[in-house]
Structure formats: C-alpha cells, structure tokens
Amino acid sequence: MDEQERYARAKEHVEALQGFYVHLAAYIIVNVLLFAANILTDPGGLWLY
C-alpha cells in the first residue's frame, strides 16, 4: 500500500468520524429542544409516556 492509498483511506475514515459526530450533535440538540418544549408547555407530564 503506497502513501497515497493510506492517505485516501485515512481521509475517508476522518470524514466518516466527522459525519458521525455532526449527526450525534444534531440528535442531541433536537432532543434537548424537544425536552425543553415539553417542560415549558406541560411541566407536570412528559411526552414520552
């Protein structure tokens, strides 16, 4: 395996990790906003029941 192939594989791996963390951050942000909307609109009950 030459250096260019190793670089290409490493770049793909980094891009895959980056994509994972971007989606994870979006998931967390959306869930926090949904939880906040739930608490602000109905403090006595949770939607997840």
Image: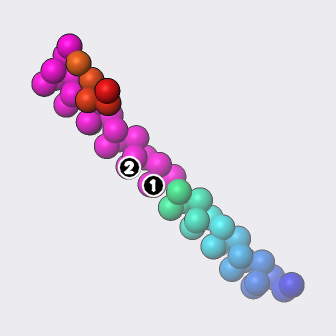
In the image, residue 19 sits, relative to residue 12, either above or below, namely above
Residue found 26% across the figure and 29% down from its top = 47
Q: Is residue 7 left or right of residue 49?
A: right
Between 48 and 41, the residue placed more toward the observer is 48
Residue found 23% across the figure and 18% down from its top = 45
Between 9 and 45, the residue placed more toward the observer is 45
- Give the magenta-colored segment's residue range: 21-44
Quarter the N terminus occupies:
bottom right
On residue 26, the disc is: 2
Q: Position of residue 18 (x, y in %)?
A: 54, 59
Q: Which residue is most to the right?
A: 1
Q: Is residue 45 left or right of residue 9?
A: left
Q: Which image quadrant for residue 16?
A: bottom right
In the image, residue 8 sits, relative to residue 14, either above or below, namely below
Q: Which residue is mark 1?
A: 22
Q: Amino acid at mark 1?
A: Val
SS at mark 2 in the image: helix
Q: Is residue 11 left or right of residue 43?
A: right
Q: Amino acid at mark 2?
A: Ala
Q: Which residue is most to the top?
A: 44
Q: Is residue 2 visible?
A: yes
Between 6 and 43, the residue placed more toward the observer is 43
Q: Mark 2–mark 1 contact, CB under 8 Å? A: yes
Q: Position of residue 41 (x, y in %)?
A: 13, 24
Residue found 27% across the figure and 23% down from its top = 46
Q: Position of residue 31 (x, y in %)?
A: 34, 38
